[in-house]
Image: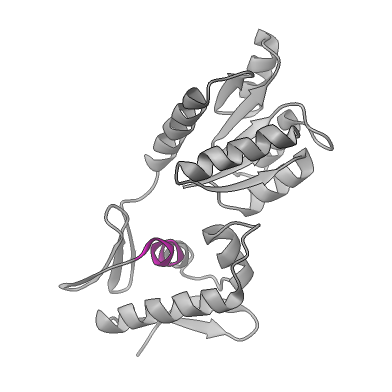
């Protein structure tokens, strides 16, 4: 799961980032509304934890812009204010939940888990392309009677490719969506994972392979 923290209280934001990483979330942290909107728009997150009072663009505007652009990532808004009007405004702007500072970290984690479950209800159990099927419940890739297990990053990459079968995905896009925008992962790492996945597709004797368009990126191709 991936979570984005947007809060201009740097110490709090960094502490929340560590909290979520400790609880096995891939986590990005930014400190103003403009960066929050940019990351949320590009990062394929499962939940955005968004403060209301932010420099450059407040949380209300961030969530409004996301919804106008058909970005339906669940948003949990944080605020130091405890007024009904602010909570109502946040929800009316498109936020999914609201938590008032100060808060217990256990409650924050529980609310985020609830939002990820709500999002998961809308996710397919399987992704299929030609003769391969990716099972999201057990991280396996199948072709006919053959099955192979995928590692966590192999699974995320394959899910990304299968979710966009007609699209060429750049290495930068793959890095941002699988590891996070601030990751120190290099293009060589992406190439290595693509090699692993090609070998597993070959083991399955699938007619699908992962091809590359030079200078553009990777895509799924059916071999004749």
Residue 187 against residue 26 in the figure, above or below: below
**155 in the magenta segment:** yes
- Tell me, yes or no, if residue 158 can be seen here: yes
Q: How is the image coloured?
A: one colour
Point out residue 15 in the picture as x, y percentages from the top left corner. 62, 36
Residue at screen point 67% across, 49% down = 39
Residue 204 against residue 19 in the figure, above or below: below
Residue at screen point 42% across, 30% down = 114
Residue situated furthest left in the rendering: 145
Depth check: 63 or 36 in front?
A: 36
Q: Main secondary structure of the magenta part?
A: helix
Point out residue 201 in the picture as x, y percentages from the top left corner. 32, 79
The answer to whether residue 68 is left or right of residue 126 is right
Depth check: 88 or 185 in front?
A: 185
Residue at screen point 72% across, 29% down = 60
Give the quadrant of the C terminus. bottom left
Residue 111 against residue 72 in the figure, above or below: above
**85 in the magenta segment:** no
Residue at screen point 63% across, 65% down = 184
Instruction: Determine which quarter of the picture holds residue 185.
Output: bottom right
Depth check: 67 or 103 in front?
A: 103
The residues colored magenta run 151-159
Point out residue 119 in the picture as x, y percentages from the top left corner. 44, 39
Point out residue 203 in the picture as x, y percentages from the top left corner. 26, 82
């Amino acid at each position: 799961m991936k979570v984005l923290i947007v809060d201009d209280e740097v110490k709090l934001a960094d502490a929340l980032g560590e909290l979520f990483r400790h609880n096995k979330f891939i986590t990005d942290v930014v400190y103003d509304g403009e960066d929050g909107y940019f990351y949320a728009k590009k990062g394929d997150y499962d939940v955005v934890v968004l403060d209301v009072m932010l420099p450059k663009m407040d949380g209300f505007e961030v969530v409004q812009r996301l919804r106008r652009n058909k970005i339906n990532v669940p948003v949990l808004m944080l605020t130091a204010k405890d007024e009904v009007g602010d909570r109502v405004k946040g929800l009316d702007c498109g936020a999914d939940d609201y938590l008032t500072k100060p808060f217990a970290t256990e409650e924050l984690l529980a609310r985020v888990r609830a939002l990820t479950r709500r999002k998961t209800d809308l996710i397919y159990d399987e992704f299929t392309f030609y003769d391969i099927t990716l099972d999201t419940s057990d991280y396996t890739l199948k072709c006919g009677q053959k099955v192979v297990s995928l590692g966590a990053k192999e699974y995320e990459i394959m899910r990304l490719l299968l979710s966009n079968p007609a699209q060429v995905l750049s290495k930068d896009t793959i890095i941002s969506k699988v590891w996070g925008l601030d990751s120190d992962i290099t293009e060589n790492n992406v190439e290595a994972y693509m090699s692993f996945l090609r070998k597993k597709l070959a083991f399955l004797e699938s007619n699908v392979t992962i091809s590359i368009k030079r200078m553009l990126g990777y895509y799924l191709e059916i071999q004749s």
